[in-house]
Amino acid sequence: MVNLDDTNKEFHNELKNISNNDELTNLQIKYLGRNGIINDFLKKINDIPTEEKKEYGKKVNELKNSFLRLIEVKRKELSEKKSDKFFDSTLPGKTFPIGSLHIVSFAIEEITKIFEKIGFIRVSYPEVDWEYSAFEALNMPKGHPARDDFETSYIDFPENLKFGKMVLTPHTSNGQNREMKRVGKPPIRMINISKCYRPNWDATHTPMFFQFEGLCVDLDINITNLKGTLDYFAEKYFGKGTKTRLRPHHFQFTEPSFEVDVTCTVCKGTSKVNENKCKVCKSGWLELGGTGMVHPNVLTEGGIDPKKFSGWAFGFGIERVIMMKYGLDDIRNYYSGDIRFLEQF
Ligand code: DAH
């Protein structure tokens, strides 16, 4: 019982010296908290001889109630006490830094808006997809070099008889077949923006990156429509006066196929190949990505009659267009998490 009396005295001593709410809360936790002194006393009840148990329990409870009351009184006292410190209410408040969109998210928003204006619908098809959507449906049969496991990452997942294995999709072209089947009958105007994966890591490649894939299928769609759309995009995204050009190329899923260049954002296309060479482009042009008229096999696989409908498609890298727009030289910075870099945009 001596213990209880000592505790009571100690509590009173400590309470006397308390000058603010935080200290009072700490005192309350120390004495009345779950692992506090009062609970310790209650836990000890088993060690007390039976005939004293009742009296002991009563005393501990009385002590507890008295502490509660005193703490209550003290809290009231503290809240009524006026602070004697001078408070200058005219000082400016603390300002918190305002966050912003990541450079890649911002570009995705911009690109989406540009294409929505001309009737394209933004979709986002799976980044983990079947071999069928990523290759087969795009006229890329088994044995195509891009399907090598050195180029494409395969998922450890049971193979499907029709759709093959699962892959981390290496391009957004996997959305073409899915969109054709979703829409059913043309017109189709799709902009598929999604993550892609390829095992490269250098200044212009990260193993995870974003692409945006355009697909337009309708009656009488031709290369003129494609060129017009590319010019529209280039002017809106890179700025007025930006031009595009098409160079013959090869892709399995388009025929004919092209690579698209845009006039360099730094020298505005004025660089000559031999003299006055621009350090960024060396020729007046920068490569944007691949495009072409959708191959008849791809339309057929998507359930569309290639004799009736035609279409074009393109696939460009988001990190790449950002690089071209701002004249950046290392896309690994985008994902370094270095706020000093990201804050600039
Ligand atoms: N899928 C191609 C790549 O990732 C890019 C591409 C080329 C997409 C031509 C297209 C296209 O839609 O028509 O390299």
Image: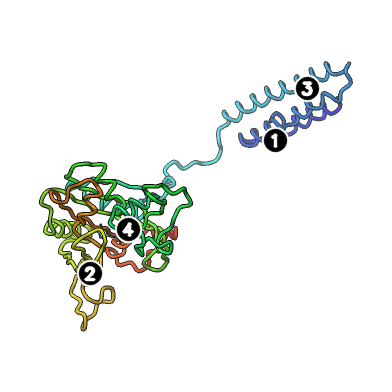
* Label 1: which secondary element: loop
Which residue is denoted by mark 4 in the rendering? Answer: 141
Instruction: Measure the C-alpha gap from mark 1 to mark 3.
Output: 24 Å
Which residue is denoted by mark 1 in the rendering? Answer: 17
Q: Nearer the viewer, mark 1 or mark 3?
A: 3
Indicate which disc, 4 or 3, sits on the residue closer to the N terminus: 3
At label 1, the amino acid type is Asn
**Mark identifier at residue 60:** 3
Vertical comparison of 3 with 328: above or below: above
Return the x and y of residue 196 as percentages of the image width and height. 37, 56
Instruction: Measure the C-alpha gap from mark 2 to mark 1.
Output: 74 Å
* Label 4: which secondary element: loop
Q: Residues within 10 Å of mark 1 (few under 14, many from 20)?
A: few
Q: Nearer the viewer, residue 135 or 18?
A: 135
Indicate which disc, 2 or 4, sits on the residue closer to the N terminus: 4
- For the point 49% across and 41% down, which residue is it? 87
Which residue is denoted by mark 2 in the rendering? Answer: 264
Indicate which disc, 1 or 3, sits on the residue closer to the N terminus: 1
Instruction: Measure the C-alpha gap from mark 4 to mark 3.
Output: 83 Å
Q: Nearer the viewer, mark 4 or mark 3?
A: 4
At label 3, the amino acid type is Val
Label 2 close to label 1 by CB (< 8 Å): no
Label 1 close to label 3 by CB (< 8 Å): no
User: Where on the image, by quarter, is ligand 1?
Assistant: bottom left
Q: Give the image quarter of residue 244.
A: bottom left
Q: Residues within 10 Å of mark 2 (few under 14, many from 20)?
A: many
Instruction: Measure the C-alpha gap from mark 4 to mark 1.
Output: 83 Å
Instruction: Measure the C-alpha gap from mark 2 to mark 4.
Output: 36 Å
Indicate which disc, 4 or 1, sits on the residue closer to the N terminus: 1
